Amino acid sequence: MPSELSGDNYQHVVVHGLPYDRGFSHGQQVKDKILRNITHYKRPGNLISWPTALRIIRECYIPGLEKYWLSGLKEMRGVADGAGVDLEDIILLNARYDLSHISNPSTTCDDPTRSLHQLTSEAEDKPYYPSYPRASSECTSAIILSEATGNGEVYTAQNWDMSDRLYKEDGIIYLEVHPHPSENLPSLFLVTEAGQLCRSGMNSDGLGLCANSLCSSIDAIPFSLDTGVGKGEMPAIPPSSALRRLFLESPSYADGLKRVARTPRHVSCNLMLTTADNMGICLEITPRIIFRISGSAGSDTPYILHSNHFKTQSFLCQSEIQDTLAGGSSWYRADRLEVGIRRKALIGFLTESDIMNAFKDHAGYPHSLCEHSARKATEGPFVQPGRPNPYSVQWDASTCTWAGVSHMGADMGEEYASLLQYTRSLESKVAELEGRAQRNITPASEHQVTSVTAELSTNVALLSMNATAEPFFVGATAGFSVSKMVEGILSQSPFPHPALDSIASSSMQATNDVCPPTNNHTRPDPQVERKLVDIFFSRVHPRYPFLDRFSFEEFYQSYQLSKDTSRVSPSKPFHLHMVLAISARIMQLHPEMGGNINPEFYYSNATRYVDEALQVPGLERIQSLLLLALYILRTPGSISNLGGWHIIGFAVRYAVELGMHRNIKCGGPRAQDPYRIEIRRRVFWSAYVLDRAVSLTLGRPFALSENDIDVDLPVALEQSPVSGKEIQYDQSSAALTETKTSNLSSFVHLCRLRRLESRIKQELYSASSPATMPDYTYDTIIDSYRQELLEWLNNIPFFTPDGKLQEGYSLYDTPEFFRIQYSKALRMLLQHRITHFTSETNSPKDKEYLALSARAAGDICQYYRTLHQRRPLGWNFLALHSIFTAGLTLLYCIWAEREHADLARFEDIRSCSNVLFAISERWPTATKFRDIFEVLAKRMVDLVSLSSVPHSGLDDAPFLPDVRISPAGALQESTGFPAMNQDDFWAMLDELVDDDYIRSQFQLNGVESSWGLFDS
């Protein structure tokens, strides 16, 4: 196919067929360009001397190409024949990078007979610095993952600071390669010098590549130049350009990385390799070692940047190899590029034009990221989206403008500009707070609580959050004592040395992952927002009905007509955007709902109103705080500077200021309005339920004592303001009949359970509870509360016999949901009792309570699995804690009953495992909990099966897929999880059972005071 002149002045060369045929076409189409390039590189002083280069080509590169890239050698031969030049001339063009990194033997070293092998070994004793020709400032490259971009694409971008000569003499081409079908290779789109087979580019399977220059002290002439040295010592090494083309010709990303790693080289280089599967890797390649930086979905920083110096930690931590091109503009060019993309990349709004503009930076000119002059143009970045849709763009650097194809033409609107301005102000506040923290750093306390016995006897642990914070309190109801008991049981039988190696690093990292944002929705869509509002009121509102839906809908309708919020209370737009953010997070956890919306977009919009919204007095302030808390519970770690436990506490205390906890009548006709009274009650009891749930999870005191509350529960009917007069305050009947059941009945019934749980905590877990009491007295109290729990369960709202939801009801109206709540309360009631056995061996009460605890924990897991099978659940931190502690309770009960193990318990463990797997698929943070539970469960089964349970019985009902009981002490890797050594195992268990993750989600770093959020 004849070549085409592209709109940006680079000739677009298209070739088809087998290697020689497409090479011949390449040579014919750009013959004049190839001749000019050959003439330039043969000119003395531009590369190593031609006689030396010719020998390297014939005795090293050609054998290397024959061995590692035969098709490339054939294609080069075709280029040579098509252009009417020698094969060695074309190899010179393809090896010009390598030949520019070594010098003539007269200047390379005192002894020209030293080979690459000798140089690499001598580098260990004495750094070797060859003399190089003057190098240009070279290139700057970027890998940008889909989390950073507004259109969800993956980009490989580069600013190629080529020489003036290439631009002036028209030495650059776009090379489009379509291999013959018999080769089974992807098509390629490349930007390269005429005659070269690859510099940078991408393929039709979604692989992309850019390259930067690197120089190290072990770059060397690839073999001895002494004629007396036998040919047996001459290594077969291809030019480094072969690594690039071999990667792009690979059938997969993994195969491409293998080819790069296993192809020898004699000079250093940097390769930036990406795939449309949202992964990227930066390789710093030397003749001996490859150093790497990886990035993938969920990475803390969704991009990798590189210039022309070694920057990997593994390189910097060694001393055998030196960076001989260090210093200069390379030390700041990547930093300047990051300044241009960081803000938008971190919130997922980066566009193609943003990337281009970032590469236009002139700081430090002429040694800048953009190093153009009136006579010089800089081509790049070569932007490769993560799709098999090849195209390129060119920057006319003389005017700093771009021409070419663009995926995304829409610019950011005013709303995005405001969002970015607010993001900058937040970053300034964070920087200020970090500075304060640095000034107040004190050495970590050496007085850590280390005695497991003491922790079990008091059921309290004061655990250090970090070196700069006071110890944070975690109480008994958090499950600490049960988890420590399980640790103690398993540690009684030591692991054999080779049993455990390491759990995958992804599981070990204390990440704050949320499901990675994938944002194709960059502008507000009324239909999408309507769906988000409906999701909130169908999934969240039935559980926490603190918003006035009718008032909310009224504002929402007016907001859709006019975005002007200047005439309404600032809490109105704040509530709207928080509702949208919470619902977007739910959709993010539910791919089956068909949404692809970034919740951080709406949360960022909401934060623009947060200062004013939290200054609005009355119910609206409490509603704002509760919305913040709900978002935190569903997105742990994303806004870790605001603590959920603290925010809920502020909401409850402000409700107390308003007298909402007391059954008192306020003056004024509005205060006497039945609908207004109901809204007040729903707001208070929603805050109450959240406070109880989080405080029980952490084992911390409640924000308000049960004895100070006498306000009535809300009615189970959700009415409009017009029909509010029809509300009847009938709280006398514990059971709700079919005619009274409504979409708030589950909330009202849950309030009753939380009040009962509060009494249990006050009597059995508070500091005023007797440290010791007669067993019969303690058991009498437990039995009394058991009876009350049963009465609560027997009075759940009415449902149809087949368990199907009636119209207007939610998941929280199902029998399974109430069973889970009952089982959680029963497990908490018995937790203290089962971890403190009576002195009487095999006491009937001990057995009874162990069986009840095991059944309660098993029911939690079984019913969660049932609900998830019916409709995938949107997980949050509280649900994860409930399931994980239920699993630990099961393991403890199995051990306590090991002499008469019940096989049904293993089915419950399997349910717990399945639920944890389901959570971790949608919420990466849960992965570490899932992995440690699998290890603990397998270990516990091994211990129990040795003494009591026939292997055949367990083999018929394994709790994990493809798991078989192994001899005691052996933890096989057949579970699908890598092993780990004993120290790492217990360190990981300590990290989990000490509730460090729980505490980290409720930390408070002083941002409230700096924003003045809670001033009256």
Image (cartoon, rainbow, N blue to C red):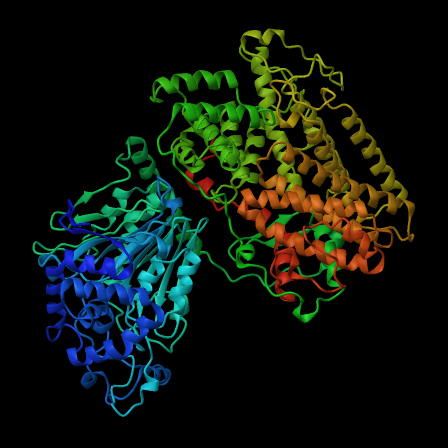
Q: Is residue 429 visible?
A: no
* Residue at 40% across, 29% down: 612
How far across and down, in percent of the image, does residue 280 sit? 39, 55
- Total labels: the figure holds 0
Instruction: Determine whether 946 is above or below 6 in the image.
Output: below
| Residue reaching furthest to the bottom | 228
How far across and down, in percent of the image, does residue 67 sit? 35, 72
Q: Which one is in front, 207 or 123?
A: 207
How far across and down, in percent of the image, does residue 579 sit? 48, 28
Left or right of residue 296: residue 659: right
* Residue at 38% across, 20% down: 559
How far across and down, in percent of the image, does residue 239 sit? 28, 70
* Residue at 28% across, 31% down: 414
Instruction: Determine whether 919 is above or below 602 in the image.
Output: below
Left or right of residue 653: residue 572: left
Q: Which one is in front, 112 or 33?
A: 33
* Residue at 83% across, 56% down: 950
Quadrant in the rendering for residue 787:
top right
Instruction: Determine whether 755 is above or below 436 in the image.
Output: above
Instruction: Determine whether 373 is above or below 556 in the image.
Output: below
Left or right of residue 692: residue 263: left
Q: Is residue 539 visible?
A: yes
